[in-house]
Amino acid sequence: MKRREFLKAAAFAAMWTAGQRCFGWSLTTEPLGGAGLDEGSGLARAELEKMFDAIAAAHAKEPFIVTRTRWLAALFDHVRLAANADDAFVHWFADCDLPGRRCWLRLKAFSESAPERKLCGKWTTATNGACRARLDTSHTCPDWESILALGPKGLADRARKRRETAKTDDERLFLDCVTEVYDALSRLCVRWAAVAEKRGMPACAESLRAIAERPPRTLREALQLSLVYDRGQEAEGECVRSQGLFDRLYVTFYRNDLAAGPETRASAKALIADYFTRLYAQGHPNGKNIGFGGYDAEGVPVWNEITEIGFELHDELNRPNPKLTYRFGKKTPREQLEKVTRCLANGRTSIVFANEEVLGEMFRRRGKSAEDIVQYVLVGCYEPGIQGREIVASMAAEVNLAKPLEAVFNSGKDFAGFPVGPACALPENAEAFEREYLRQLDAMISSAVETARLCERSWYDLNPAPFMSGGYRDCIAKAKDSSQGGCKYNQSGIMCGGIGTVADSLAAVRALVDEKKLVTMAELGEILRADWKDREELRLRAVRAAPKWGNNDDRADLPAKRVYDAVAARINAEPNGHGGTFQAGFWSIDLDKPFGDCTAATPDGRKAKTPISRNNIATAGCGKEGPTALLLSNAKLDLAESADGHIADVILPAALAKASFGAAGIAAFLRSYFEMGGQSIHLNCFDPSTLRDAMAHPENYPDLQVRVCGWNVRWNDLSRREQLLFLATAEAQSSH
């Protein structure tokens, strides 16, 4: 099986708890380049399975957190370990999917245990493409400050000390579990050191022994601890989707190393390069996000030696992963921003840019403190959260904004008869159609939210996380697992995709029915039910003549704004199931395809079972007015209300990016969008001619990357269908 096919199959197999669940890919297969597994360093998988069975049986009558703790401790004590002499760090061990997979089976059983739970975690086909809701444990940012300040032993000791003042048995149990898993992590470091030494990695072995006993003191030790922690949390079953604010976390280690000697800038850069390589070698298809820049507590833009090295390496290594976040705002110096945009001009586009002012306002509206806001990161793709103070859980539910269009034509059901919202009469005009669409959408959101809340109310019984929670300072202070609301902030996200399709459809209804009177509302409904059969001329009018989102045309943009405002107001005030509120996010990642597969034809001319619009771009092939118009459309929205994130996807022709634009032009382009109120943005830099040639001669383009939606991939790893979508979008934007 080809690697890409394996990753896709593994990802879909793991989608119960999260759209990007971690234990389907990088945990079960050897990393790129080989693992260097020492078969004699631990037990075979079958023996571990028996051990896990015995643990589950022995603790069946106790809270599930006990079983989960013992599983993880057993894994750390007995798993087979890997080390490669050519690497600076160790980062992988075998069979670390076992705890997560067993938890997945528990979650599956939960969904099958009662009728009201039947939609929990089910893929979109269970709702015929309307929505999906489940526990999202795949979007987390650990408390990297605590982890690096304390190390495994310090984290265990912190829990022991807090136990002295614990007031209830539940608090003591949680703290005991944290202590047990971090004591086991220290033992894992000692075991791993022996394997590293055996493989001829004395510096690595020394760093592992050091972090087993004390907090890291050197850059090597700190980076090694980050990788060990990353593997530990993902083995527990929660995917690490941000490596934190990298330049702030590691600059002190770097400076201390250079002051003490013999470390130099070159040797430190080599260590960071190997760290980036270890993350790349994991083979994570959605990438590991690393944060840089932003304002510090005094409002001063952060740019230091680690920032400089990070973007140098991104340019030099030219890899899809890790992917980088760069935070900037009005106070960011031009020369700093241009050092980052130079990467884009060179075709290194695995970077998302985040707006300090808009995201700061968003966090303030959500009640987050000024001292916490300066520590924000983008988790996963572009979902904002506070480093170390919240899980983020940005995909607690996913909503297909295009689905209620069918329900308006079919009395609250889609064309296949699946209930979406309340029964309704067929609207007579476009204004009534939009009102009814919003009513159907509200009902669909209610269903998604209630299913997500149902899952979250049982979170502690389904997915307690003593390892992940033990890293969070607030979970220890409260003596509560993160699943019980132990973090300082406990929000979770509702992702809403397809706003371009909706805006175009609402505009098309007005154009076709009200203004040009080409069809009646009833006739349009029947045409869509028949997937535009024998009505190609009318379909082309809908595609070519009706207004389109993403072209700075108020006839499509204002309906989009009304939908956006209604959805944000509806979701952002909704309590979730673990002590916080839900948050509205406007993006789709690559769910435009599975959502589209389950969605009938829409009034904008889209045919059934084809992708809906992706993220917040114009429908493929319809962004005729170019990237500036796309950003002007997005800027009409109050993007500080996108609490779960909002992204603008832009394609810049490569010739423009390198020649007349260059790093300075790209920087000015980005800054203009942020001054208009943009939240986050990422870019592709290529020409349609290059893409066409790459389709014809893939052997000539082994390193060509594209920004898919929240991560980069090699062009040659995309399916032909995906390549054609990119080509259509690139051709539309380059035509202006």
Image: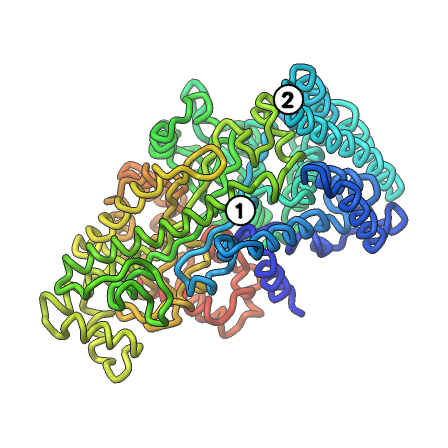
Task: Name the residue rendered at 34%, 30% in the picture.
Answer: 365
**Spot occupied by residue 243 in the image (x, y as percentages of width and height):** 58, 37
**Spot occupied by residue 555 in the image (x, y as percentages of width and height):** 16, 56
Q: Earlier in the sequence, mark 2 or mark 1?
A: 1
Task: Please tell me which residue lies in front, 358 or 137.
Answer: 137
In this view, the residue farthest toward the top is 165
Query: Mark 1 is on which residue type?
Result: Leu
Residue 428 appears in which quarter of the rendering? bottom left
Q: Which element type, helix, strand or loop, lies under badge 2?
A: loop
Above or below, comparing residue 372 to residue 534 in the picture: above
Marks counted in the figure total 2
Q: Which residue is mark 2?
A: 168
Task: Please tell me which residue lies in front, 383 or 298.
Answer: 383
Q: Is residue 348 visible?
A: no
Task: Name the residue rendered at 82%, 34% in the picture.
Answer: 205
- Which quadrant of the figure contains the C terminus? bottom left
**Spot occupied by residue 514 in the image (x, y as percentages of width and height):** 10, 66
Q: Which residue is mark 1?
A: 135
Residue 151 appears in which quarter of the rendering? top right
Q: Is residue 624 left or right of residue 474?
A: left
Task: Name the residue rendered at 76%, 34% in the picture.
Answer: 185
In this view, the residue farthest toward the bottom is 534
